[in-house]
Image (cartoon, grey):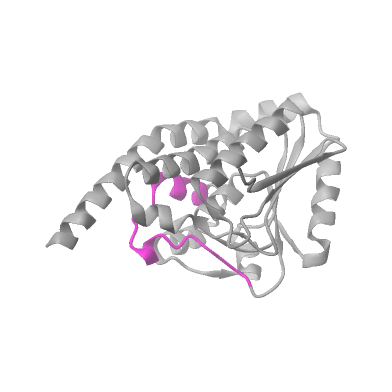
Amino acid sequence: MTTLVHYSLADGIATLTLDDGKRNALSPAMFRDIYAALDRAEADRAIVILTGREQVFSAGFDLKVMKAGGLDTLRMLRAGYSLTARVLAYPYPVITACNGHVLAMGVFLMLSTDYAIGTRGDFRVAANEVAIGMTMPRVAAAMLRHRLAPADYQAAVTLSQYFPVEEALRAGFFHELTEAPQLMQRARELAAGFAKLDRASHTASKRRIRGPLIRYIRRSVPLDLVDAAWAAIWAARRGKG
């Protein structure tokens, strides 16, 4: 079985590298490996750096699975939406080292981490659901609202606005930007700094302020799955018409 998430541990820092050899589509197999890697990192009591392959963090859900429809699609959506709550509640700091482009579910995963570093360059950040004919899911909208400035939140959700990295920094997608060669070094520096925090206080404070959001996500996942199922039914009916 091919491993799509590579796990390495050093000095209490677990690096999870997403790499499918292409655009890091968040497929059922990718989600399986992400969940397994997070469980391993938690067992190791590790701070997490989540990163991707050269020039791309993730292009979002696997469109082949999305287009196929059926239970596999719903299972993939459930894994993705639920992953945001899993990361939000992770007991130790989580850093995204974003290698370049990040779209759709990749954005929502990134926004669920504690700190996001972007890479300078000709890269784009977008939640492009509306552009491809999807009503923005509740979970996705909640993750965007969690971090973005109000006007940018509106533009991201309703207009599928593509943000160059400097604009993405201003809007709240990223906490800082760095050059590509320094990305992982900067992530490790931050992780080493965060390691000096009191772990128990970090965990309790994170869960206290994020409790309402995490509960909202968990309530919303089934509703978003129902919406997705109905959207597929109506699309099929239109196709037959």
Residue drawn at x 39%, y 62% as measured from the top left: 158
Tell me where residue 150 appears, x and y as whole percent. 50, 57
Quadrant in which the N terminus is drawn: top right
Rendering quarter of residue 173: bottom right
Residue drawn at x 30%, y 40% as measured from the top left: 226
Span colored in magenta: 123-145
Q: Nearer the viewer, residue 138 or 17?
A: 17
Q: Name, please, the residue furthest toward the front.
A: 1
Vertical order, 6 against 236 (above or below) = above
Tell me where residue 109 appears, x and y as whole percent. 57, 48
197 is within the stretch colored magenta: no
Quadrant in which the C terminus is drawn: bottom left
Left or right relative to 129: residue 50: right
Would you say residue 30 is visible in this rendering?
Answer: yes
Exactly how many numbered labels are in the figure? Answer: 0
Would you say residue 91 is visible in this rendering?
Answer: no
Residue drawn at x 70%, y 31% as measured from the top left: 40
Q: Name, please, the residue furthest toward the left.
A: 241
Tell me where residue 143 appears, x and y as whole percent. 51, 47
Q: Name, please, the residue furthest toward the bottom.
A: 122
Q: Nearer the viewer, residue 219 or 6?
A: 6
Tell me where residue 102 appears, x and y as whole percent. 58, 61
Rendering quarter of residue 113: top right
Q: Nearer the viewer, residue 202 or 31?
A: 31
Residue drawn at x 51%, y 69% as measured from the top left: 162
